[in-house]
Amino acid sequence: MIFSLLFYSNSFGQTKASFKPNFKKSKRTTHKIKKEQKYTFGYLEVLENRQDRNSRTIEIPIYIFKSRSENPKKDPIVYTVGGPGYTTMPSAQFMNYYKYLDDRDFILVEQRGNYYAKPHLDCPEWSQAIYESNQPNFDLANYDSLFEQSVKSCKERLEKQGIDLNGYNTNEIASDINDLVNVLEIDKYNLLTISYSTKIAQVLMRDYPDKIRSVLMDSPLPLEVNYDEESVQNLMESISTLLSDCENDTECNSAYPNLKNRFFEYLKEKTANPLKVEIENPKSDKTETFYLKGEDLITVFTSASTGSVPNVPFEINKLLNNDLTSLEDKLEGLFQEPGNGAGLGMRLSVWCAEEYPFNSIDRIKNETIKYPEVKGLSPAVFGNKICEIWSVEKVAEIENQAVKSAIPVLFINGAYDNETPVKWAKSMTANFTNSYHLIFKGWKHTPTTNWSNQCAMELANEFFNNPKEKPSSDCFGQIGNPKFKTE
């Protein structure tokens, strides 16, 4: 549900020749906040496209949570999540669990175009296409045309609403945060970013560095990396690392000997001769048949969270022994009704302006066939035709170049992260001269959001309190390779 929170929005969507960003408080919030938590909620009003002098204005929801300390530090933390296309606002419900509030205020920023922003760039047409393409009777010959038509329909609908799709990119989001800091008259602040939003941090450090005291990049995505060119390689390297750790663990190797080789050979065989899986359609009670290749079966790893990593060898072994119960449970989920495609339009605008234009088509083609275990799995988030239809303007070359800075930075990675691998952060340390890098053994993407073990959050907070030293909480030394499930 989207709340209509402001009653002063007669200005929303209007052209403003000499517009100045502003923040307006609202008593109605996106989420219910616990009574004991002190906060301010409102909307940052900014231009939709700062490159267009006739741009209309848009509204971005902001929470400012007050520190639990009686004498909080004066430099707040500004936090926005990843994606692109994910909403930051649901985090507001759980502020009492965030350690950062022990020392300073904490500001949640929704990225423009996402679920609680106005406007929000949802694409239910895309979700419908995913749903249709996942049904067992779908004709794969129609796959490309189905998604191309869904993107065309979404684009046409959003543009009829007056939305300028060129206004939704990393540079504009970074400018939003800079405007917010200035409007709130903050002298110094700290940045907490995860995954995609680490790109926002890099742009802020390059273009608006003066007020930034320190930056935490959890699972960083370097500006200079062409994500689409190597995502399959990163996937294969990450699962290989996990299975090698199993082989080097006496109990895991004893329970599942030679597991890596056996699993990779299994994936190759199923890519050539797909696995037949029959399940009961919960809607019709009919028996439906799926044919799964290696690119489908690799989800036994990609769908695992940090908490379920210890189960990965066990689940792989089940597959190898033709125990399909876990797989059947996942397939049943394909019959659930499609979602609303929240944030998908924003994701398209970012990706098609910032990633797609810098891709090597030849490298992507090669990556699609390079690994026989998952042959046919494209590394590209969106195909060329999709971005041609979305047709947003390519960003400047500088947006694909490395940022250099002396601002204190803490990089955090999960050792098994295939989305933003450890090697990317390692490469960034040379350009960030006051940086530290922590790698969490056995963990996956975005360690600071691991609620079952808040060690990464504890270290992040330690860094914000003293960014001139590498954090060294005892909890980090206690994290070793996972205790793999063997029975």
Image (cartoon, helix red, strand yellow):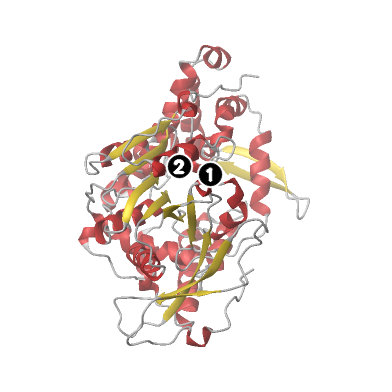
Dividing the picture into quadrants, the one containing residue 36 is bottom right
**For residue 409, which quarter of the picture?**
top left
- The dot on residue 461 is 2
State whether residue 434 appears in this view. Answer: yes
Mark closer to the chain start, 1 or 2: 1
| Picture layout, residue 437 above or below residue 82 | above
Residue drawn at (40%, 57%) of the image: 382
Residue 228 at least partly seen: no
Q: Please name the residue shown 47% across and 60% down the image.
A: 85
Work out whether 158 lies above or below 248: below
Q: Amino acid at mark 1?
A: Lys
Q: Secondary structure at mark 2?
A: helix
Give the numbered dot on residue 99.
1
In this image, 340 relative to 441: left or right?
right
Residue 8 higher or lower than 362, as above or below: below
Along the viewing direction, whichever of 323 and 423 lies nearer the viewer: 423
Q: Is residue 177 left or right of residue 34?
A: left
User: Looking at the image, do the residues carrying marks 1 and 2 touch, with CB atoms under 8 Å apart?
Assistant: yes
Find the distance from the CA under tag 1 to the CA under tag 2: 7 Å
SS assignment at label 1: helix
Horizontal and vertical percent for residue 48? Answer: 39, 76
